[in-house]
Image: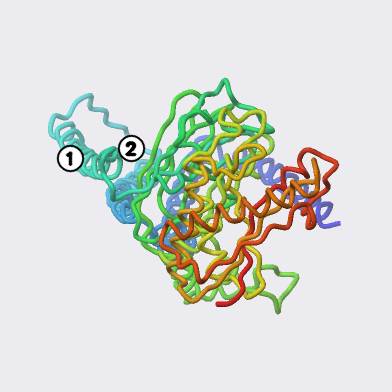
């Protein structure tokens, strides 16, 4: 109904305009063509002059009215270290171009009015004026030189790469594709592993990580971007298909993601998400409900989050490339970091795609050490800690060399928790003779106990016990189940 009314109004306005034109045409014939011509010029010049006034006032008033929703103004000050210099350059450019804009618009409409055709007036044309040409050449040249020099200074401050040997920055990677971002963080080694596009497998290896490069073994891919405030960050930017654009508006970060040509951007966040929210909270428009259909729900400032977007029209699903960005304090970042798991360890390790299947790697040891630290810290009496990297020769109680990594860590933790007493339990699968299995489990438990004692743990705190095949942890009918049943466990007797 509303659309019909609007359409009828438009049609009516068109009809009225046509009729007014016809009336003016008839009036012109009555008054004479020449007189009508000069009157039309007077009206047009006057209306243009009035339009100029309203137009310029509207530009200034609307800019002032909407200043708090534009980047760089109101609550939307830059949240990065370099962003303030970019905003300053924008304001400087706006200052000079604004002056030119107002002057040229004023002259355009004022001349249309002042030099309108009038009876008895004759136009004067002059082809050249050296003074004017000097003025409109020299002044813009000086202003442009200033803007270019200032822009180059800021560019050189914002865009230099980091020294690869520096330790004051962290690097992450953002890979755009239709229609999302894959974000990759380095693990404890602080280095991102090598990639090879020929190894991309959307199911098992979406980034084409080269698993023979050990730097890949602790890299992880979170669902959101979390960064510590005050930390310099280098973002390595790539694309897996078409042109995308890595855009963090609140940090003044914007860089193309180009297939086959990695780009980068370096920035330092200076405001946490919570600090930015508190700035927004001071403005009435951010006190409005986030969802207008829920007037009693959370407000806009409460639901605010930094975001990563794609600023390139990369296809129909372009809108879905939004990704959450959180800036937090260092301790909160470290807590979050501790919850992240290596993509290699959780999705590739000891599977067919793993070139190190069946081998014990440094990343396994580091990951397992973290698990053991947590297990001993949270251990309760009668609690069980299963040792995952304790290996014996087949049918023997002789420890393999790889067992030393886990058992040395266990000895270290037992010496740290000096009041803890434990039972070392040995278990076997159900294959073979029952008595032989029981004897084997007793001997293996004793071998582990002897290793711990040799590494400084008091023998009075330890007992060993063999359970043979009596307490299976899984089904003995499958190879996987039998492997789980061949295990060594620590039982906490007291703390």
- Mark 1 or 2: in front is 1
Judging by the rendered image, the residue that carries numbered circle 2 is 121
Specify the quadrant that holds the C terminus. bottom right
Rendered location of residue 138, percent (x, y)? 15, 35
Tell me the element at label 1: helix
Do the residues bearing badges 1 and 2 touch, measured as CB atoms within 8 Å? no
Residue 393 is tagged as none
Q: Of all residues shown, which one is farthest toward the top?
A: 198
Residue 388 shown left or right of residue 467 in the figure? left
Q: Nearer the viewer, residue 295 or 366?
A: 366
| Residue 73 in which image quadrant | bottom left
Tell me the element at label 2: loop
Q: Is residue 434 visible?
A: yes
- Measured in 3D between alpha carbons, the distance from the residue under mark 1 to the one under mark 2, in whole angstroms, is 33 Å
Rendered location of residue 463, percent (x, y)? 59, 66
Q: Nearer the viewer, residue 225 or 136?
A: 225
Q: Nearer the viewer, residue 225 or 316?
A: 225
Q: Residues within 10 Å of mark 1 (few under 14, many from 20)?
A: few
Residue 24 shown left or right of residue 437 in the figure? left
Q: Is residue 353 above or below residue 151?
A: above
Rendered location of residue 47, percent (x, y)? 49, 51
Judging by the rendered image, the residue that carries numbered circle 1 is 139
Q: Is residue 30 above or below residue 82?
A: above
């Amino acid at each position: 109904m509303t659309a019909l009314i609007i359409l009828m109004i438009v049609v009516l306005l068109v009809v009225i305009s046509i009729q007014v034109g016809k009336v003016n045409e008839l009036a012109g014939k009555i008054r004479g063509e020449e007189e009508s011509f000069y009157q039309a010029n007077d009206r047009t010049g006057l209306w243009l002059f009035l339009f100029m006034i309203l137009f310029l006032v509207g530009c200034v008033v609307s800019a002032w009215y909407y200043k708090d929703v534009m980047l760089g103004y109101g609550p939307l000050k830059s949240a990065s270290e370099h962003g303030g210099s970019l905003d300053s350059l924008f304001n400087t450019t706006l200052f000079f171009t604004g002056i030119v804009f107002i002057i040229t618009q004023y002259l355009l409409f004022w001349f249309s009015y002042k030099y309108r055709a009038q009876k008895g007036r004759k136009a004067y044309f002059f082809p050249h004026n050296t003074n004017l040409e000097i003025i409109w050449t020299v002044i813009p040249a000086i202003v442009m030189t200033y803007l270019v020099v200032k822009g180059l200074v800021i560019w050189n401050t914002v865009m230099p790469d980091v020294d690869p040997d520096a330790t004051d920055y962290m690097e992450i990677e953002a890979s755009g594709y239709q229609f999302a971002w894959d974000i990759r963080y380095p693990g404890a080694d602080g280095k991102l592993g090598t990639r090879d596009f020929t190894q991309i497998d959307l199911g098992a290896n979406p980034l084409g990580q080269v698993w023979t490069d050990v730097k890949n073994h602790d890299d992880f891919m979170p669902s959101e971007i979390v960064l510590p405030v005050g930390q310099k960050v280098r973002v390595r930017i790539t694309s897996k298909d078409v042109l995308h654009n890595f855009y963090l508006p609140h940090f003044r970060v914007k860089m193309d993601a180009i297939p086959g040509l990695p780009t980068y951007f370096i920035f330092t966040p200076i405001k946490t998400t919570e600090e930015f929210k508190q700035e927004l909270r001071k403005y009435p428009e951010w006190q409005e409900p986030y969802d207008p259909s829920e007037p009693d729900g959370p407000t806009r400032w409460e639901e605010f989050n930094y975001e990563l977007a794609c600023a390139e029209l990369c296809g129909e699903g372009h809108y879905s490339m939004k990704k959450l960005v959180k800036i937090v304090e260092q301790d909160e970042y470290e807590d979050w970091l501790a919850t992240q798991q290596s993509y290699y360890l959780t999705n590739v390790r000891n599977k067919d795609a793993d070139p190190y299947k069946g081998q014990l790697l440094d990343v396994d040891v580091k990951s397992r050490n973290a698990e053991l630290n947590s297990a001993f810290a949270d251990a309760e009496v009668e609690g069980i800690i299963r040792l995952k990297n304790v290996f014996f020769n087949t049918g023997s109680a002789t420890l393999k060399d790889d067992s030393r990594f886990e058992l040395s860590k266990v000895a270290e933790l037992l010496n740290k928790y000096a009041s803890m007493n434990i039972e070392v339990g040995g278990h076997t699968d159900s294959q073979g003779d029952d008595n032989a299995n029981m004897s084997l489990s007793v001997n293996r438990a004793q071998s582990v106990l002897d290793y711990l004692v040799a590494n400084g743990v008091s023998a009075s705190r330890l007992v060993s016990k063999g359970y043979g095949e009596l307490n299976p942890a899984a089904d003995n009918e499958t190879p996987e189940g039998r492997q789980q049943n061949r295990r060594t466990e620590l039982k906490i007797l007291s703390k």
